[in-house]
Amino acid sequence: MPDPAAERDAAEAESAFSHPVVAPDTTVAYGAHPDQVVDFYSPRSGRAGAPLVVVLHGGAWRAEYDRQHTTPFVDFLARRGFAVANVEYRRGSGLPGQGGAGPVAGRWPETFDDVAAAMDLMPGLVREAIPGADSRRIVVTGHSAGGHLALWAAARHELPADSPWHLPAAPALRGVVALAPIADFTVARELGVCTGAVDQLVGGSERFDERRPYADPAALLPTGIATVIVQGRTDIVVPQAVAEAYTDAAAKAGETVGLTLLEDVGHFPLIDPSADACAVVAEEIEQLAY
């Protein structure tokens, strides 16, 4: 029998991926590798002093998904009056790992190296690319695996002191809006999110316990940075339980994380500019930016 949840997810994905790629206004490198680039989109209103939204794309940290699929969402934010930075970063192999059935998720440590470098350099990059943007008002957002990276980028001051990505103080961010993020590695593993992607990201299941304190947002709380998660209740890709595990961990750490649950919404409408859910995301970003 057909699976209604799977059919709905497929239809939502088809809609989200149906929009044409939107070319950036300019692209700036933050490193020597071809994937170490940021695409910048100026606010379509032409407004000076626009806040900057940094977007970290999803795709289970796998090579087959790059920043191109989020460009309609990025353009949607630019049309709402934001300056937008669409970050690329190194992802896993496009080929199956040894004994694996599909592409490998993530590269350790390169995926984290790249996000850390891009975020550290972002104020200078945006001054070069969009001189009129306000680099003092930065909101980070990301979808799915990119939501994980957004939460992680805001929590680097909570990393162990021996981490190469550790910051001595909290990053200067207005906030984080994480969209259906892979926010709690333990629960994501239990639920088999993205077919073993979490274990692959950290270099294999045998490295999970060792590397989780350096990679799992749920282990890096409290952050002291305003954080909101937007989650569809019918998401079967990254289920609601993952977001709830993160907000529960935050509460136990003494921090309140907002959780906006959207009825009859799955994984992909959050980045689909033709979906009502995408407007909700923009509103959450606006509340933190202004």
Image (cartoon, rainbow, N blue to C red):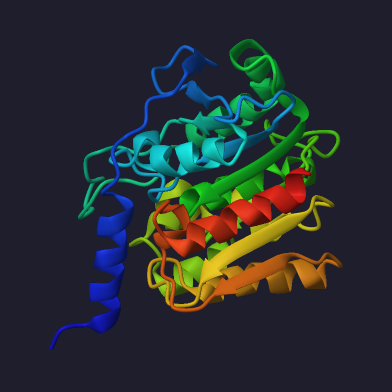
Looking at the picture, how far across and down is residue 224, in whole percent? 84, 52
How far across and down, in percent of the image, does residue 73 sit? 45, 44
Can residue 71 be seen at all in this image of the molecule? yes
Q: In the image, is residue 259 above or below residue 13?
A: below
Point 80% across, 35% down: residue: 172
Q: Position of residue 134 (x, y in %)?
A: 75, 26
Q: Could one spot residue 209 in this view of the protein?
A: no
Between 133 and 223, the residue placed more toward the observer is: 133
Q: Residue furthest bottom?
A: 1
Q: Quadrant of the C terminus?
A: top right
Quadrant of the frame with the N terminus:
bottom left
Query: What residue is shown at x 86% (from left), y 36% (from top)?
Result: 169
Identify the residue at image location x=32%, y=46%: 104
Left or right: 70 in relation to 280 = left
Whether residue 29 is situated above or below residue 207 in the rendered picture: above
Residue at 80% across / 72% down in the picture?
252
